[in-house]
Image (cartoon, rainbow, N blue to C red):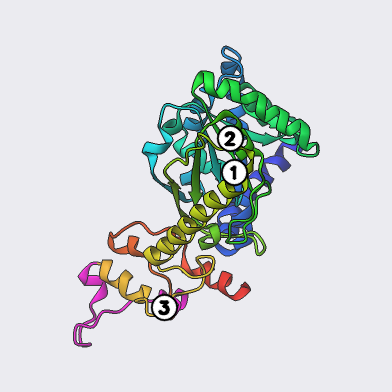
Amino acid sequence: MISNYAELFLICAIILMPIFYETSSRFRYYFKFVVYYGVVILNSFLLIPVFLFRPCDVRNLILASKFCRLASPIVSIKWEVRGAEHMSADRAMVMVANHQSSLDILGMFDFWHIMDKCTVIAKRELFFAWPFGLAAWLSGLIFIDRRHPQRAQTAMNDSTKMLIKRRTKLWVFPEGTRRTTNEIHPFKKGAFHVAVRAQLPILPVVYSSYHTFLDDRNKVMNPGHVIVTALPPIETKGLTNDDIPELIERTRNAMIETFKATTKEVENRFNLSGHGITPAKGTATVISRIAAAMPSTVRTVSGGGGATVAPPGVTSFIEPEPRKIESLIGGDASPIKEPTAYRRKDVQRD
């Protein structure tokens, strides 16, 4: 009897899931994050036995990234990497990146093979989120206790010897807390103290804004395109602790400039506004693009002067001035590929 109920529940879930996905932006938001975290957790289970053969080796992260990066196409996010030559340099350095969401880690999975030997500063609480925490520790992640700044600083300083000896990169989110506020917040000094004391270069890494596809407040996550830019390294040779405030300001200003430029580029390339939901003015209608992609026997109506029209039932789902969807006519793949039927619902809620 119990098995029958379980089978019935499974069948209903399979039938209803596509319906919820197509009609509810909130469901899509949670579904995509569940898929993302599910892929990471599953790979942690599978790879822990493999990592035991070379524990605490940062190269384990390259293997992990090969599997975890599969989540990106599933949740419809494309990562475009620029400045890969700076990431691939075979030298120890401190990489600082802006922190918007846990999706930042998903982006790292996409280009970890470029960085090769790289470890990450992570908050101590993540270690207890098993199996991910155990897999991360076996992959050489450095966990710090942010509630005790002195301990955190000591842990970071101790890691510098390993960085220099093994030519390993140290990835840090200097903002500390992730925020999807469409700006880069003030930096904490820890990463810069490490760089100056060890005389290691600072490598700024900038993710373009997620606001083009992600809205945590309203639980909206559309397909997205993110430009990840590695700027030229900033040398710290000859600098002292007195130079750290100026170093932080110079690094942050360069990242802010790149953040604004790449975000604007994404918006212009895909004609986005807001969270990838609000239609951009002056954009050609989706009806004309769908009609242009259809065979002439379908889109041409005799007696109407050969006018191009949409098939019956399409117009009720099309907005007057929708976003640009070049993928319909074979152009550059746009991150906005979801049906307009539920994009209308998103617009109304925002």
The earlier-in-sequence mark between 2 and 3 is 2
Residues shaded magenta:
295-319
Marks 1/3 in contact by CB < 8 Å: the verdict is no
Label 2 is placed on what type of residue?
Answer: Val
- SS for tag 1? helix
The residue pinned by badge 1 equals 243
> Camera-side residue: 196 or 40?
196
C-alpha gap between disc 1 and disc 3: 62 Å
Which residue corresponds to the image point at 55% horizontal and 37% vertical from the top-left? 239
**Residue pointed to by mark 2:** 196
Above or below 180: residue 242: above
Mark closer to the chain start, 1 or 3: 1
Q: Is residue 225 visible?
A: yes
| Residue 219, horizontal then vertical, whole percent | 64, 60
In this view of the protein, can residue 144 be seen by the observer?
Answer: no
In the displayed structure, 274 sits above or below 74; it is below
Q: Amino acid at mark 1?
A: Asp
Give the residue type at disc 3: Thr
Asked whether 304 falls inside the magenta stretch, the response is yes
Residue sitting at 80 percent across and 36 percent down? 148
